[in-house]
Amino acid sequence: MDTEIIRAIILGIVQGITEFFPISSTAHLILFPWFFGWEGRVDTLSFDIALHTGTLAAIVICFFKDWIEILTKRPKLLSLLILSTIPGGLCGFFFDDLVETTLRSPLIISISLTGIGVFMFLSERHYKKRMIKSSLGAITLSDAILIGFAQAVALIPGVSRSGITISTALFRGVSRETAAKYSFLMATPIIAGATILEGISMINVGDFRGDISLFAAGIAASFLSGLGAIKFLMIFFRKYSLRVFVYYRFALAFIIIAVMLLHYYG
């Protein structure tokens, strides 16, 4: 099998898992080529966008029935989800260039991994002291606003959309499983909007690089791994906390700094 195809599949799996695990998909898509010296078609923004279409398909399929119910029978929840989406949408529109250039450095990623890791850890400690809101219907207007602003911060590589939004929900007393479900539902329009806008932009400037087989392999891998990641997390959060992901974030940040020092002094 062609080396580029293998790399595309690997990055597709990485995207599918890390898009939903609270460890930052953007960070991992930047770090894998950086760690292993991968260049070429898989190390392009157009390929990253293609991988997001796979995870978008996964999240739509997993929550298709929920979205039908929300659109037809739950106008209040729909309004809250729309409200939560606005801050991230506006920040993505106005700060896209900054995010895609200046903020994609390994140093910023390591800082984000550590800082949000601490935030996630504290949310778990605070969570045990709160009355628990165990259904989507219990989420309030103020919850939706705060979670929405948290999602806007997730534009910074290394933050993790699911990590910061779930943690913010925990601070607000929302159960882990409900927080994860709200986070994934809220991510649907954000991922769709970002994918469409970036795709249109790249078509306009002629920046789509890569053959069909390469993109197809990456999209299929991100779709299948994304399905598995969502189903796993919805079961995982019924019993377990965010702490294992916190420890992973700290370990990855340490590795990034170590590699940077080796490159600098090597």
Image (cartoon, rainbow, N blue to C red):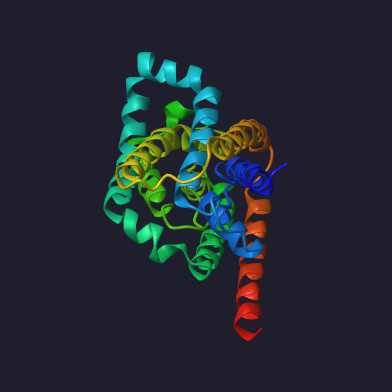
Q: In this view, does 18 lie above or below 71?
A: below
Q: In this view, does 241 lie above or below 116?
A: above
Quarter where residue 225 is shown: top right
Q: Quadrant of the C terminus?
A: bottom right
Q: Position of residue 71 (x, y in %)?
A: 37, 18
- Whether residue 132 is visible to the viewer of this picture, yes or no, is no
The residue closer to the viewer here, 261 or 118, is: 261
Quarter where residue 75 is shown: top left
The residue closer to the viewer here, 208 or 239, is: 208
Q: Quadrant of the N terminus?
A: top right
Q: In this view, does 48 lie above or below 248?
A: above
Q: How many labels does the image show?
A: 0
- Whether residue 254 is visible to the viewer of this picture, yes or no, is yes
| Identity of the residue furthest to the top in this view | 72
Asked whether, in this view, residue 191 is left or right of residue 127, the answer is left
Asked whether, in this view, residue 68 is left or right of residue 243, the answer is left
| Identity of the residue furthest to the right in this view | 1
Asked whether, in this view, residue 166 is left or right of residue 201, the answer is right
Q: Where is residue 4 in the image (x, y as percent from the top left)?
A: 64, 48
Q: Position of residue 163 (x, y in %)?
A: 53, 49
Q: Which residue is drawn at 34% across and 32% down?
A: 80
Asked whether, in this view, residue 155 is left or right of residue 32, the answer is left
Q: Where is residue 133 in the image (x, y as percent from the top left)?
A: 50, 34
Q: Which residue is drawn at 62% across and 32% down?
A: 234
